[in-house]
């Protein structure tokens, strides 16, 4: 395909609109995007936002022309080579330490309770903490592999610390096979930590789980609208980006929930409830 920058305005707009139409057909976004009457800037902006929601299984459904358009826009998510991410110097958090710790705790709980690779990828695509691995998401096939990677990104300082407090003598005896590889008090602390973590997971839920619960608990006659779900998310997750949460709602309701959780019924009012 000819470079977008070398096309005249009308031709370039038509090419962008065709790419947007194809993405809409492949991903079945709700509400659907209508490119007719939209400016070049509006169509380009939508293409960039929609591209982050593409799944690895969608790659084969995208034509070469649309792939070329997304590549030229710099948003094709399945590029074989990814620019290396330069290490970022640690900076002082803007938030109060307690607030930052609570936000990471919520995110960690959301990652831990995710039941599939797809849910973890949705989290990575809608949270800036995981921006550096978005280009490699297609390479992750196992839930545990992606989960461990994301947890390590949230808490890099926690890696390799579980054996702190082991003396040199204990280390020597451990290597000689005279005692268990992990001291009893370490085992007890790990067990308590796991129990505490499990209790915390039961108390807190993430964005996707909240969306599912909103639909599942909605009145069968009145249902719940996407706008009402968004208000719930804004209240429960005030620090999250509203636009990202709105995109997550559109992906989950009704298609993803219907496919992975339970049948969803759309009422005449346009609201949704569990069928």
Image: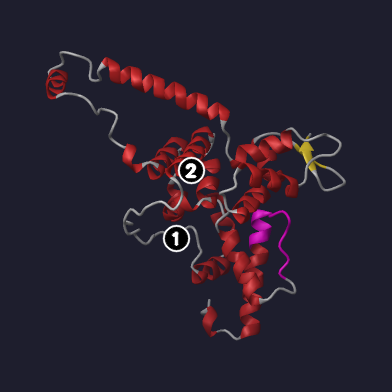
- At 73% from the left and 56% from the top, the residue drawn is 31
Above or below, comparing residue 14 to residue 31 in the picture: below
Which residue is the extreme one toward the front? 96
Depth check: 89 or 175 in front?
89
Q: Which mark is residue 223?
A: none
Which is more foreground, mark 1 or mark 2? 2
Depth check: 141 or 183 in front?
183
Query: Going by the image, does 148 lie left or right of 223?
Result: left
Depth check: 69 or 200 in front?
200
Q: Which residue is mark 2?
A: 99
Q: Is residue 34 within the magenta segment?
A: yes
Q: Position of residue 236 (x, y in %)?
A: 62, 41
Q: Position of residue 158 (x, y in %)?
A: 33, 37
- For the rendered model, the colour scheme is secondary structure
Name the quarter where the C terminus is drawn. Answer: top right
Contact between labelled residues 2 and 1, with CB atoms less than 8 Å apart: no
- At 65% from the left and 66% from the top, the residue drawn is 20
Above or below, comparing residue 70 to residue 235 in the picture: below
Q: Which residue is mark 1?
A: 79
Q: Which residues are magenta?
A: 23-35
Q: Position of residue 154 (x, y in %)?
A: 41, 43
Label the magenta part by its dominant secondary structure.
Answer: loop
Mark 1: which secondary structure? loop
- At 60% from the left and 47% from the top, the residue drawn is 238
The number of discs equals 2
Mark 2: which secondary structure? helix
Q: Quadrant of residue 86?
A: bottom left
N-term-proximal mark, 1 vs 2: 1
Query: Going by the image, does 253 lie left or right of 64?
Result: right
């Amino acid at each position: 395909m000819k470079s977008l920058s070398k096309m005249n305005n009308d031709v370039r707009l038509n090419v962008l609109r065709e790419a947007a139409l194809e993405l809409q057909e492949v991903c079945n976004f709700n509400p659907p995007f209508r490119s007719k009457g939209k400016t070049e800037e509006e169509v380009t902006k939508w293409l960039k936002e929609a591209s982050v929601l593409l799944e690895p299984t969608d790659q084969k459904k995208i034509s070469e022309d649309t792939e070329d358009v997304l590549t030229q826009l710099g948003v094709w998510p399945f590029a074989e080579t990814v620019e290396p991410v330069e290490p970022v110097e640690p900076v002082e958090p803007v938030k109060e330490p307690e607030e930052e710790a609570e936000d990471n705790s919520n995110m960690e709980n959301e990652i831990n309770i995710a039941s599939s690779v797809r849910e973890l990828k949705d989290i990575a695509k809608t949270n800036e903490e995981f921006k550096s691995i978005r280009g490699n998401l297609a390479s992750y096939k196992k839930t545990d592999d992606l989960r461990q990677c994301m947890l390590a990104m949230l808490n890099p300082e926690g890696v390799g610390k579980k054996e702190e407090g082991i003396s040199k003598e204990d280390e020597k005896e451990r290597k000689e096979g005279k005692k268990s590889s992990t001291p009893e008090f370490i085992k007890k602390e790990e067990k308590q930590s796991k129990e505490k973590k499990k209790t915390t997971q039961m108390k807190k839920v993430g964005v996707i789980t909240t969306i599912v619960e909103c639909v599942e608990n909605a009145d069968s006659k009145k249902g719940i609208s996407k706008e009402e779900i968004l208000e719930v998310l804004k209240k429960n997750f005030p620090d999250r980006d509203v636009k990202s949460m709105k995109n997550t709602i559109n992906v989950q309701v009704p298609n993803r929930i219907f496919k992975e959780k339970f049948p969803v019924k759309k009422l005449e009012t346009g609201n949704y409830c569990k069928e």
